[in-house]
Image: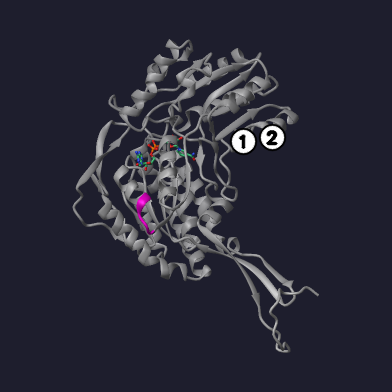
Protein backbone atom coordinates (compact mmCIF):
# COMPACT_ATOMS: atom_id res chain seq x y z
CA UNK A 1 0.00 0.00 0.00
CA UNK A 2 1.64 3.23 -1.17
CA UNK A 3 1.80 6.25 1.13
CA UNK A 4 2.33 9.56 -0.68
CA UNK A 5 3.32 12.78 1.02
CA UNK A 6 4.37 16.33 0.16
CA UNK A 7 7.67 17.25 -1.49
CA UNK A 8 9.06 20.33 0.22
CA UNK A 9 12.53 21.85 -0.14
CA UNK A 10 13.93 19.00 -2.21
CA UNK A 11 12.74 16.08 -0.10
CA UNK A 12 9.64 14.23 1.13
CA UNK A 13 7.88 15.84 4.08
CA UNK A 14 8.40 13.91 7.31
CA UNK A 15 5.56 15.24 9.47
CA UNK A 16 2.38 13.49 10.59
CA UNK A 17 -0.63 14.53 8.47
CA UNK A 18 -3.83 15.59 10.22
CA UNK A 19 -5.86 14.23 7.28
CA UNK A 20 -5.23 11.65 4.61
CA UNK A 21 -7.21 10.56 1.57
CA UNK A 22 -7.49 7.17 -0.12
CA UNK A 23 -6.04 6.52 -3.56
CA UNK A 24 -8.01 4.02 -5.68
CA UNK A 25 -7.14 1.70 -8.53
CA UNK A 26 -10.15 2.40 -10.79
CA UNK A 27 -9.78 -0.95 -12.57
CA UNK A 28 -10.26 -2.96 -9.37
CA UNK A 29 -12.24 -0.47 -7.31
CA UNK A 30 -9.86 -1.13 -4.42
CA UNK A 31 -7.80 1.30 -2.33
CA UNK A 32 -4.15 1.16 -3.43
CA UNK A 33 -2.65 3.80 -1.16
CA UNK A 34 -3.10 6.93 0.89
CA UNK A 35 -2.09 10.54 0.39
CA UNK A 36 -1.43 13.21 3.01
CA UNK A 37 -3.60 16.31 2.78
CA UNK A 38 -1.87 19.63 3.41
CA UNK A 39 -3.17 22.20 5.86
CA UNK A 40 -2.12 25.86 5.85
CA UNK A 41 1.00 24.87 7.82
CA UNK A 42 2.40 22.57 5.11
CA UNK A 43 1.42 25.03 2.37
CA UNK A 44 3.25 27.80 4.26
CA UNK A 45 6.32 25.56 4.50
CA UNK A 46 6.25 24.84 0.75
CA UNK A 47 5.82 28.51 -0.17
CA UNK A 48 8.60 29.48 2.28
CA UNK A 49 10.91 26.94 0.59
CA UNK A 50 10.00 28.33 -2.84
CA UNK A 51 10.51 31.90 -1.63
CA UNK A 52 13.90 31.07 -0.12
CA UNK A 53 15.04 29.38 -3.36
CA UNK A 54 13.87 32.29 -5.52
CA UNK A 55 16.83 34.74 -5.24
CA UNK A 56 19.37 32.08 -6.18
CA UNK A 57 17.34 30.54 -8.99
CA UNK A 58 16.27 33.79 -10.63
CA UNK A 59 19.92 34.93 -10.69
CA UNK A 60 21.04 31.61 -12.20
CA UNK A 61 22.23 32.14 -15.77
CA UNK A 62 20.00 31.34 -18.71
CA UNK A 63 22.60 28.83 -19.87
CA UNK A 64 22.37 26.95 -16.56
CA UNK A 65 18.55 27.08 -16.37
CA UNK A 66 18.37 25.75 -19.88
CA UNK A 67 20.89 22.98 -19.02
CA UNK A 68 18.66 21.85 -16.13
CA UNK A 69 15.70 21.67 -18.53
CA UNK A 70 17.72 19.60 -21.02
CA UNK A 71 18.73 17.18 -18.23
CA UNK A 72 15.12 16.97 -17.00
CA UNK A 73 13.98 16.27 -20.55
CA UNK A 74 16.29 13.26 -20.81
CA UNK A 75 15.25 11.95 -17.38
CA UNK A 76 11.53 12.17 -18.15
CA UNK A 77 12.09 10.42 -21.48
CA UNK A 78 13.98 7.57 -19.79
CA UNK A 79 11.30 7.24 -17.06
CA UNK A 80 8.37 7.44 -19.45
CA UNK A 81 7.08 3.94 -18.74
CA UNK A 82 7.33 4.40 -14.97
CA UNK A 83 5.42 7.68 -15.16
CA UNK A 84 2.83 6.09 -17.43
CA UNK A 85 2.41 3.14 -15.04
CA UNK A 86 1.72 5.53 -12.15
CA UNK A 87 -0.87 7.33 -14.27
CA UNK A 88 -2.62 4.11 -15.29
CA UNK A 89 -2.65 2.74 -11.74
CA UNK A 90 -4.48 5.78 -10.32
CA UNK A 91 -6.32 7.35 -13.26
CA UNK A 92 -7.22 4.16 -15.11
CA UNK A 93 -6.34 5.24 -18.68
CA UNK A 94 -4.70 2.64 -20.91
CA UNK A 95 -0.88 2.43 -20.96
CA UNK A 96 -0.44 3.78 -24.52
CA UNK A 97 -2.61 6.78 -23.69
CA UNK A 98 -0.65 7.42 -20.47
CA UNK A 99 2.64 7.24 -22.42
CA UNK A 100 1.17 9.67 -24.95
CA UNK A 101 0.35 12.08 -22.14
CA UNK A 102 3.98 12.01 -20.99
CA UNK A 103 5.13 12.63 -24.58
CA UNK A 104 2.86 15.67 -24.95
CA UNK A 105 4.15 17.05 -21.63
CA UNK A 106 7.72 16.55 -22.83
CA UNK A 107 7.04 18.81 -25.80
CA UNK A 108 6.62 21.69 -23.37
CA UNK A 109 9.97 20.83 -21.75
CA UNK A 110 11.52 20.85 -25.25
CA UNK A 111 10.07 24.33 -25.70
CA UNK A 112 11.35 25.47 -22.28
CA UNK A 113 14.88 24.31 -23.19
CA UNK A 114 14.92 27.23 -25.64
CA UNK A 115 14.38 29.79 -22.86
CA UNK A 116 17.46 31.89 -23.74
CA UNK A 117 15.89 32.65 -27.09
CA UNK A 118 12.36 33.05 -25.66
CA UNK A 119 13.46 35.70 -23.16
CA UNK A 120 15.23 37.84 -25.73
CA UNK A 121 13.93 41.40 -25.59
CA UNK A 122 13.87 44.13 -28.21
CA UNK A 123 16.44 46.93 -28.64
CA UNK A 124 16.04 50.22 -30.46
CA UNK A 125 19.05 52.42 -30.93
CA UNK A 126 18.72 56.20 -31.03
CA UNK A 127 14.99 56.48 -30.20
CA UNK A 128 15.89 60.07 -29.50
CA UNK A 129 19.27 61.63 -30.12
CA UNK A 130 21.77 59.67 -28.03
CA UNK A 131 18.97 57.70 -26.33
CA UNK A 132 18.42 53.93 -26.66
CA UNK A 133 15.45 51.79 -25.55
CA UNK A 134 15.19 48.09 -24.78
CA UNK A 135 12.82 45.60 -23.18
CA UNK A 136 13.47 42.75 -20.75
CA UNK A 137 11.26 40.15 -19.08
CA UNK A 138 11.80 39.08 -15.46
CA UNK A 139 10.27 36.24 -13.39
CA UNK A 140 7.14 37.02 -11.36
CA UNK A 141 8.30 35.14 -8.24
CA UNK A 142 6.69 32.13 -6.57
CA UNK A 143 4.07 30.58 -8.87
CA UNK A 144 1.44 27.99 -7.92
CA UNK A 145 -0.14 25.33 -10.16
CA UNK A 146 -3.41 23.56 -9.28
CA UNK A 147 -4.19 20.68 -11.59
CA UNK A 148 -6.99 18.19 -12.42
CA UNK A 149 -7.10 14.40 -12.21
CA UNK A 150 -7.35 13.70 -15.92
CA UNK A 151 -3.75 14.53 -16.95
CA UNK A 152 -1.59 14.06 -13.83
CA UNK A 153 1.66 14.50 -15.80
CA UNK A 154 0.81 16.54 -18.89
CA UNK A 155 -1.14 19.38 -17.29
CA UNK A 156 1.48 20.11 -14.56
CA UNK A 157 4.02 20.03 -17.40
CA UNK A 158 2.03 22.70 -19.24
CA UNK A 159 3.02 24.96 -16.35
CA UNK A 160 6.17 24.30 -14.32
CA UNK A 161 8.80 23.79 -17.07
CA UNK A 162 8.14 27.27 -18.44
CA UNK A 163 7.71 28.85 -15.01
CA UNK A 164 11.04 27.39 -13.82
CA UNK A 165 12.91 28.15 -17.05
CA UNK A 166 11.77 31.78 -16.72
CA UNK A 167 13.43 31.93 -13.28
CA UNK A 168 10.40 31.47 -11.02
CA UNK A 169 10.01 28.90 -8.26
CA UNK A 170 6.92 26.71 -8.10
CA UNK A 171 4.44 24.99 -5.78
CA UNK A 172 2.27 22.32 -7.41
CA UNK A 173 -1.03 21.10 -5.93
CA UNK A 174 -1.94 18.07 -8.06
CA UNK A 175 -5.25 16.25 -7.96
CA UNK A 176 -5.72 14.22 -4.81
CA UNK A 177 -7.15 11.39 -6.95
CA UNK A 178 -3.84 10.56 -8.70
CA UNK A 179 -1.01 12.20 -6.76
CA UNK A 180 1.87 9.74 -7.36
CA UNK A 181 3.19 10.79 -10.77
CA UNK A 182 3.89 14.36 -9.60
CA UNK A 183 6.29 13.05 -6.96
CA UNK A 184 8.35 11.20 -9.54
CA UNK A 185 8.52 14.45 -11.55
CA UNK A 186 9.81 16.21 -8.41
CA UNK A 187 12.53 13.58 -7.96
CA UNK A 188 13.55 13.89 -11.61
CA UNK A 189 13.78 17.70 -11.36
CA UNK A 190 16.08 17.32 -8.35
CA UNK A 191 18.20 14.78 -10.24
CA UNK A 192 18.37 17.21 -13.18
CA UNK A 193 20.08 19.75 -10.91
CA UNK A 194 17.20 22.02 -9.87
CA UNK A 195 18.08 23.56 -6.48
CA UNK A 196 16.14 22.46 -3.40
CA UNK A 197 12.98 24.49 -2.86
CA UNK A 198 12.61 25.62 -6.47
CA UNK A 199 9.90 22.98 -7.05
CA UNK A 200 7.54 21.76 -4.32
CA UNK A 201 4.44 19.57 -4.25
CA UNK A 202 1.64 19.85 -1.72
CA UNK A 203 -1.21 17.36 -1.81
CA UNK A 204 -4.76 17.79 -0.65
CA UNK A 205 -7.99 19.48 -1.56
CA UNK A 206 -9.79 22.76 -0.88
CA UNK A 207 -7.89 23.67 2.30
CA UNK A 208 -4.53 23.39 0.53
CA UNK A 209 -5.79 25.32 -2.49
CA UNK A 210 -7.28 28.11 -0.38
CA UNK A 211 -4.00 28.50 1.52
CA UNK A 212 -2.18 28.99 -1.80
CA UNK A 213 -4.77 31.45 -3.15
CA UNK A 214 -4.46 33.78 -0.16
CA UNK A 215 -0.71 33.41 0.50
CA UNK A 216 0.98 36.81 0.15
CA UNK A 217 4.17 35.33 -1.33
CA UNK A 218 2.40 33.50 -4.18
CA UNK A 219 2.46 35.90 -7.14
CA UNK A 220 0.85 33.87 -9.92
CA UNK A 221 -1.66 31.02 -10.04
CA UNK A 222 -2.23 28.64 -12.95
CA UNK A 223 -5.29 26.43 -12.65
CA UNK A 224 -6.80 23.72 -14.83
CA UNK A 225 -10.03 21.96 -13.80
CA UNK A 226 -13.79 22.30 -13.92
CA UNK A 227 -15.51 25.60 -14.70
CA UNK A 228 -17.11 26.30 -11.28
CA UNK A 229 -13.74 25.83 -9.53
CA UNK A 230 -11.89 27.77 -12.26
CA UNK A 231 -14.24 30.72 -11.71
CA UNK A 232 -13.71 30.48 -7.94
CA UNK A 233 -9.93 30.32 -8.32
CA UNK A 234 -9.92 33.31 -10.65
CA UNK A 235 -12.13 35.45 -8.42
CA UNK A 236 -10.36 34.51 -5.18
CA UNK A 237 -6.77 34.74 -6.38
CA UNK A 238 -7.27 38.02 -8.29
CA UNK A 239 -8.94 39.46 -5.17
CA UNK A 240 -5.66 38.64 -3.40
CA UNK A 241 -3.75 40.57 -6.05
CA UNK A 242 -2.36 37.62 -7.99
CA UNK A 243 -1.93 37.09 -11.70
CA UNK A 244 -4.26 34.22 -12.66
CA UNK A 245 -4.95 31.93 -15.59
CA UNK A 246 -7.79 29.49 -14.82
CA UNK A 247 -8.79 26.97 -17.46
CA UNK A 248 -12.21 25.37 -17.03
CA UNK A 249 -14.41 22.67 -18.48
CA UNK A 250 -15.65 22.08 -21.99
CA UNK A 251 -18.34 20.85 -24.34
CA UNK A 252 -16.51 20.18 -27.58
CA UNK A 253 -18.53 19.90 -30.78
CA UNK A 254 -17.56 18.10 -33.94
CA UNK A 255 -19.49 19.25 -37.01
CA UNK A 256 -19.78 16.83 -39.91
CA UNK A 257 -20.84 18.44 -43.20
CA UNK A 258 -22.61 16.32 -45.85
CA UNK A 259 -19.57 16.31 -48.16
CA UNK A 260 -17.21 14.90 -45.50
CA UNK A 261 -15.48 11.53 -45.72
CA UNK A 262 -17.84 9.68 -43.36
CA UNK A 263 -15.41 6.86 -42.58
CA UNK A 264 -12.76 9.38 -41.50
CA UNK A 265 -15.39 11.24 -39.48
CA UNK A 266 -16.65 8.05 -37.79
CA UNK A 267 -13.10 6.99 -36.85
CA UNK A 268 -12.43 10.46 -35.47
CA UNK A 269 -15.67 10.58 -33.48
CA UNK A 270 -14.91 7.24 -31.82
CA UNK A 271 -11.26 8.15 -31.07
CA UNK A 272 -12.10 11.59 -29.74
CA UNK A 273 -15.29 10.58 -27.95
CA UNK A 274 -14.07 7.49 -26.12
CA UNK A 275 -10.26 7.84 -25.85
CA UNK A 276 -9.32 8.05 -22.18
CA UNK A 277 -12.98 7.13 -21.45
CA UNK A 278 -14.00 10.64 -22.50
CA UNK A 279 -12.14 12.13 -19.54
CA UNK A 280 -10.30 14.68 -21.66
CA UNK A 281 -11.02 18.39 -21.71
CA UNK A 282 -10.63 18.22 -25.50
CA UNK A 283 -12.78 15.08 -25.93
CA UNK A 284 -15.58 15.36 -28.46
CA UNK A 285 -18.83 15.07 -26.53
CA UNK A 286 -21.31 16.53 -29.03
CA UNK A 287 -21.40 15.49 -32.66
CA UNK A 288 -23.43 17.77 -34.93
CA UNK A 289 -24.42 15.91 -38.09
CA UNK A 290 -25.65 18.21 -40.86
CA UNK A 291 -28.52 16.73 -42.92
CA UNK A 292 -28.78 14.35 -44.64
CA UNK A 293 -25.85 12.21 -43.38
CA UNK A 294 -26.98 11.68 -39.74
CA UNK A 295 -28.30 8.11 -40.01
CA UNK A 296 -25.40 6.87 -42.12
CA UNK A 297 -22.81 8.42 -39.79
CA UNK A 298 -24.48 7.03 -36.66
CA UNK A 299 -24.50 3.54 -38.23
CA UNK A 300 -20.75 3.76 -38.93
CA UNK A 301 -20.02 4.97 -35.39
CA UNK A 302 -22.12 2.19 -33.80
CA UNK A 303 -20.27 -0.41 -35.84
CA UNK A 304 -16.89 0.86 -34.58
CA UNK A 305 -18.04 1.15 -30.96
CA UNK A 306 -19.07 -2.49 -30.86
CA UNK A 307 -15.50 -3.64 -31.44
CA UNK A 308 -13.83 -1.47 -28.77
CA UNK A 309 -12.04 -3.47 -26.08
CA UNK A 310 -12.78 -2.07 -22.62
CA UNK A 311 -10.57 -3.38 -19.81
CA UNK A 312 -7.83 -2.58 -17.29
CA UNK A 313 -5.36 0.05 -18.50
CA UNK A 314 -2.33 -2.16 -17.84
CA UNK A 315 -3.69 -4.92 -20.11
CA UNK A 316 -2.24 -4.59 -23.62
CA UNK A 317 -5.48 -5.37 -25.46
CA UNK A 318 -7.44 -2.62 -23.68
CA UNK A 319 -8.44 0.39 -25.75
CA UNK A 320 -10.48 2.11 -23.05
CA UNK A 321 -10.17 1.88 -19.26
CA UNK A 322 -12.49 2.58 -16.34
CA UNK A 323 -13.64 5.96 -15.02
CA UNK A 324 -11.71 7.64 -12.24
CA UNK A 325 -14.03 7.10 -9.25
CA UNK A 326 -17.21 5.21 -8.45
CA UNK A 327 -19.11 8.48 -7.83
CA UNK A 328 -18.02 9.84 -11.20
CA UNK A 329 -18.94 6.58 -12.96
CA UNK A 330 -22.41 6.66 -11.41
CA UNK A 331 -22.91 10.33 -12.25
CA UNK A 332 -21.95 9.73 -15.90
CA UNK A 333 -24.21 6.66 -16.12
CA UNK A 334 -27.06 8.79 -14.76
CA UNK A 335 -27.07 10.80 -18.00
CA UNK A 336 -28.14 7.71 -19.94
CA UNK A 337 -31.49 7.54 -18.17
CA UNK A 338 -31.95 11.30 -17.96
CA UNK A 339 -31.20 11.63 -21.70
CA UNK A 340 -33.83 9.04 -22.57
CA UNK A 341 -36.34 10.68 -20.19
CA UNK A 342 -35.80 13.98 -22.02
CA UNK A 343 -36.39 12.40 -25.45
CA UNK A 344 -32.96 11.24 -26.67
CA UNK A 345 -32.47 7.80 -28.24
CA UNK A 346 -30.02 5.46 -26.45
CA UNK A 347 -28.39 4.14 -29.64
CA UNK A 348 -25.61 2.29 -27.77
CA UNK A 349 -25.89 1.51 -24.04
CA UNK A 350 -22.40 1.40 -22.49
CA UNK A 351 -23.71 -0.38 -19.38
CA UNK A 352 -23.97 -3.60 -21.34
CA UNK A 353 -20.57 -3.37 -23.10
CA UNK A 354 -18.34 -6.38 -22.20
CA UNK A 355 -15.42 -5.67 -19.86
CA UNK A 356 -12.42 -7.74 -20.92
CA UNK A 357 -10.34 -8.95 -17.98
CA UNK A 358 -11.64 -6.37 -15.54
CA UNK A 359 -12.59 -6.89 -11.92
CA UNK A 360 -16.31 -6.57 -11.22
CA UNK A 361 -15.82 -3.77 -8.71
CA UNK A 362 -13.93 -1.50 -11.13
CA UNK A 363 -15.50 1.80 -12.14
CA UNK A 364 -16.65 0.57 -15.54
CA UNK A 365 -18.87 2.15 -18.11
CA UNK A 366 -18.62 1.20 -21.77
CA UNK A 367 -18.91 3.59 -24.73
CA UNK A 368 -22.36 5.09 -25.04
CA UNK A 369 -24.14 6.87 -27.91
CA UNK A 370 -27.13 9.14 -27.34
CA UNK A 371 -28.82 10.14 -30.60
CA UNK A 372 -31.37 12.86 -31.40
CA UNK A 373 -30.07 15.00 -28.55
CA UNK A 374 -31.20 18.64 -28.48
CA UNK A 375 -29.59 21.69 -26.86
CA UNK A 376 -32.21 21.90 -24.11
CA UNK A 377 -31.41 18.43 -22.67
CA UNK A 378 -29.20 18.12 -19.58
CA UNK A 379 -27.05 15.49 -21.29
CA UNK A 380 -26.12 18.26 -23.74
CA UNK A 381 -25.95 21.22 -21.37
CA UNK A 382 -23.72 19.56 -18.76
CA UNK A 383 -20.09 18.60 -19.23
CA UNK A 384 -20.50 14.83 -18.71
CA UNK A 385 -16.74 14.03 -18.82
CA UNK A 386 -17.19 10.35 -19.60
CA UNK A 387 -17.60 7.94 -22.53
CA UNK A 388 -20.93 9.39 -23.70
CA UNK A 389 -21.18 10.85 -27.20
CA UNK A 390 -24.29 12.89 -27.97
CA UNK A 391 -25.45 13.26 -31.58
CA UNK A 392 -27.38 16.38 -32.55
CA UNK A 393 -28.98 16.73 -35.97
CA UNK A 394 -28.75 20.10 -37.78
CA UNK A 395 -30.59 21.09 -40.94
CA UNK A 396 -27.79 23.34 -42.23
CA UNK A 397 -24.29 24.65 -41.59
CA UNK A 398 -25.84 27.84 -40.18
CA UNK A 399 -27.84 25.85 -37.65
CA UNK A 400 -24.75 23.83 -36.66
CA UNK A 401 -22.57 26.86 -35.98
CA UNK A 402 -25.47 28.53 -34.17
CA UNK A 403 -25.58 25.59 -31.74
CA UNK A 404 -21.84 25.86 -31.01
CA UNK A 405 -21.79 29.62 -30.59
CA UNK A 406 -24.77 29.52 -28.23
CA UNK A 407 -22.96 27.04 -25.95
CA UNK A 408 -21.40 28.63 -22.85
CA UNK A 409 -18.13 26.70 -23.29
CA UNK A 410 -15.54 27.44 -25.98
CA UNK A 411 -12.61 25.09 -25.49
CA UNK A 412 -12.18 23.00 -28.66
CA UNK A 413 -14.17 22.17 -31.78
CA UNK A 414 -13.68 20.41 -35.11
CA UNK A 415 -15.20 20.45 -38.56
CA UNK A 416 -15.14 17.52 -40.96
CA UNK A 417 -15.53 18.50 -44.60
CA UNK A 418 -13.78 18.36 -47.97
CA UNK A 419 -14.80 21.95 -48.73
CA UNK A 420 -11.91 24.29 -47.93
CA UNK A 421 -14.14 27.34 -48.16
CA UNK A 422 -16.58 25.93 -45.61
CA UNK A 423 -13.72 25.03 -43.26
CA UNK A 424 -12.24 28.50 -43.60
CA UNK A 425 -15.60 30.13 -42.87
CA UNK A 426 -16.03 27.88 -39.81
CA UNK A 427 -12.62 28.74 -38.36
CA UNK A 428 -13.42 32.42 -38.88
CA UNK A 429 -16.91 32.37 -37.37
CA UNK A 430 -16.77 29.88 -34.52
CA UNK A 431 -16.41 31.27 -30.97
CA UNK A 432 -13.99 28.65 -29.70
CA UNK A 433 -10.29 28.84 -28.79
CA UNK A 434 -8.91 25.71 -30.48
CA UNK A 435 -10.18 24.47 -33.83
CA UNK A 436 -9.52 21.32 -35.84
CA UNK A 437 -10.14 20.90 -39.56
CA UNK A 438 -10.53 17.16 -40.15
CA UNK A 439 -8.60 16.82 -36.83
CA UNK A 440 -10.84 15.91 -33.89
CA UNK A 441 -8.64 16.86 -30.91
CA UNK A 442 -6.70 19.95 -31.95
CA UNK A 443 -4.43 20.31 -28.91
CA UNK A 444 -1.90 22.97 -29.98
CA UNK A 445 1.77 22.09 -30.16
CA UNK A 446 4.01 23.42 -27.37
CA UNK A 447 5.14 26.42 -29.43
CA UNK A 448 1.55 27.64 -29.80
CA UNK A 449 -0.56 28.11 -26.67
CA UNK A 450 -3.49 26.17 -25.22
CA UNK A 451 -6.68 27.88 -24.12
CA UNK A 452 -10.40 28.13 -24.69
CA UNK A 453 -12.86 30.98 -24.87
CA UNK A 454 -15.93 31.88 -22.78
CA UNK A 455 -16.47 29.66 -19.69
CA UNK A 456 -13.48 27.50 -20.63
CA UNK A 457 -10.92 30.08 -19.51
CA UNK A 458 -10.82 32.88 -16.95
CA UNK A 459 -7.89 35.25 -17.40
CA UNK A 460 -6.06 36.81 -20.30
CA UNK A 461 -3.30 34.40 -21.26
CA UNK A 462 -3.44 30.83 -22.50
CA UNK A 463 -1.05 28.20 -21.10
CA UNK A 464 2.40 27.24 -22.43
CA UNK A 465 3.95 28.58 -25.65
CA UNK A 466 4.71 32.29 -25.75
CA UNK A 467 1.58 33.04 -23.70
CA UNK A 468 3.14 30.87 -20.95
CA UNK A 469 6.38 32.84 -21.10
CA UNK A 470 4.41 36.08 -20.81
CA UNK A 471 2.31 34.76 -17.93
CA UNK A 472 5.35 33.80 -15.85
CA UNK A 473 7.30 37.00 -16.53
CA UNK A 474 6.85 40.74 -16.13
CA UNK A 475 8.08 43.15 -18.75
CA UNK A 476 10.30 46.15 -18.26
CA UNK A 477 11.06 48.80 -20.83
CA UNK A 478 14.33 50.68 -20.28
CA UNK A 479 15.19 54.00 -21.85
CA UNK A 480 18.85 54.89 -21.44
CA UNK A 481 21.19 57.70 -22.30
CA UNK A 482 24.95 57.56 -21.93
CA UNK A 483 26.43 60.93 -22.61
CA UNK A 484 28.93 61.11 -25.41
CA UNK A 485 32.40 61.96 -24.07
CA UNK A 486 32.33 65.11 -26.19
CA UNK A 487 29.11 66.31 -24.55
CA UNK A 488 29.18 69.51 -22.54
CA UNK A 489 26.61 71.85 -21.01
CA UNK A 490 23.21 71.51 -19.35
CA UNK A 491 20.07 70.27 -21.08
CA UNK A 492 16.88 70.89 -19.11
CA UNK A 493 14.50 70.21 -21.98
CA UNK A 494 13.06 67.17 -23.66
CA UNK A 495 15.46 65.09 -25.71
CA UNK A 496 15.67 66.62 -29.17
CA UNK A 497 15.60 64.71 -32.42
CA UNK A 498 18.02 66.02 -35.01
P1 LIG B 1 -11.84 19.85 -10.38
O1 LIG B 1 -12.22 21.24 -10.74
O2 LIG B 1 -12.74 19.07 -9.51
O3 LIG B 1 -10.41 19.84 -9.62
C1 LIG B 1 -9.30 20.51 -10.15
C2 LIG B 1 -8.37 20.90 -8.99
O4 LIG B 1 -9.07 21.78 -8.11
C3 LIG B 1 -7.91 19.71 -8.15
O5 LIG B 1 -6.55 19.90 -7.81
C4 LIG B 1 -8.82 19.78 -6.93
O6 LIG B 1 -8.20 19.27 -5.76
C5 LIG B 1 -9.08 21.26 -6.79
N1 LIG B 1 -10.40 21.55 -6.21
C6 LIG B 1 -11.53 20.80 -6.34
N2 LIG B 1 -12.56 21.38 -5.67
C7 LIG B 1 -12.07 22.53 -5.13
C8 LIG B 1 -12.65 23.56 -4.33
N3 LIG B 1 -13.92 23.54 -3.98
N4 LIG B 1 -11.85 24.57 -3.96
C9 LIG B 1 -10.56 24.63 -4.30
N5 LIG B 1 -9.95 23.66 -5.05
C10 LIG B 1 -10.69 22.63 -5.47
O7 LIG B 1 -11.55 19.08 -11.75
P2 LIG B 1 -11.23 17.52 -11.97
O8 LIG B 1 -12.46 16.74 -11.75
O9 LIG B 1 -10.00 17.14 -11.25
O10 LIG B 1 -10.87 17.53 -13.53
C11 LIG B 1 -11.82 17.46 -14.56
C12 LIG B 1 -12.21 18.84 -15.05
O11 LIG B 1 -11.05 19.54 -15.51
C13 LIG B 1 -13.16 18.80 -16.24
O12 LIG B 1 -14.12 19.80 -16.06
C14 LIG B 1 -12.25 19.13 -17.42
O13 LIG B 1 -12.91 19.70 -18.53
C15 LIG B 1 -11.31 20.08 -16.80
N6 LIG B 1 -10.08 20.18 -17.57
C16 LIG B 1 -9.91 21.28 -18.33
C17 LIG B 1 -8.77 21.40 -19.10
C18 LIG B 1 -8.55 22.61 -19.95
O14 LIG B 1 -7.47 22.72 -20.50
N7 LIG B 1 -9.47 23.53 -20.09
C19 LIG B 1 -7.81 20.38 -19.09
C20 LIG B 1 -8.03 19.26 -18.29
C21 LIG B 1 -9.18 19.18 -17.52
Counting residues from the N terminus, which is met first, the one under dot 1 or under dot 2? 2
Residue 191 position within the rendered picture, expressed as x and y whole percent measured from the top left: 38, 62
Q: Identify the residue position indicated by label 2 in the image.
A: 428
Element at badge 1? strand
Measure how far apart labels 1 and 2 are at the Cα level. 10 Å
Q: Measuring 30% from the left and 57% from the top, which residue is drawn there? A: 44
Question: Depth check: 213 or 23 in front?
Answer: 213
Magenta: main secondary structure equals: loop
Element at badge 2? helix
Q: Quadrant of residue 14?
A: bottom left
In which quadrant will I find the N terminus?
top left
Residue 216 position within the rendered picture, expressed as x and y whole percent measured from the top left: 37, 57
Please indicate, yes or no, whether residue 391 appears anywhere in the rendered image: yes
Q: Identify the residue position indicated by label 1 in the image.
A: 435
- What are the residue bounds of the magenta stretch? 213-217
Question: Depth check: 80 or 7 in front?
Answer: 7
In which quadrant will I find the C terminus?
bottom right
Q: Is residue 498 left or right of residue 476?
A: right
Q: Quadrant of residue 29?
A: top left
Q: Is residue 173 left or right of residue 139?
A: left
Which of the two marks, 1 or 2, is nearer to us in this view?
2
Category of crowding for the residue at label 1, using alpha-carbon neighbours closer than 10 angstroms: few (below 14), some (14–19), many (at least 20)? many
Amino acid sequence: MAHRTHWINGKPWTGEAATRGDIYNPATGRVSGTVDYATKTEVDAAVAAADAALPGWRETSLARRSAVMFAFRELVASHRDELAARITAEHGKVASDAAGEVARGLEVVDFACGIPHLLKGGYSENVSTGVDAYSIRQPVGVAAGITPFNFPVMVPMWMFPIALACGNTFVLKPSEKDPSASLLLAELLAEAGLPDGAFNVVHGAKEAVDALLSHPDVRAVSFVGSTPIARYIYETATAHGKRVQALGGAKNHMVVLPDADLDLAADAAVNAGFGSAGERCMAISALVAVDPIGDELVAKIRQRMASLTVGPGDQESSEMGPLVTRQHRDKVAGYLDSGVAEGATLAVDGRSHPITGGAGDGFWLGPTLLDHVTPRMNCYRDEIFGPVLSVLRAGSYAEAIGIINANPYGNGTAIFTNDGGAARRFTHEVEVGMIGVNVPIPVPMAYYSFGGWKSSLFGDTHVYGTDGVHFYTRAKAVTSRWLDPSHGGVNLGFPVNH
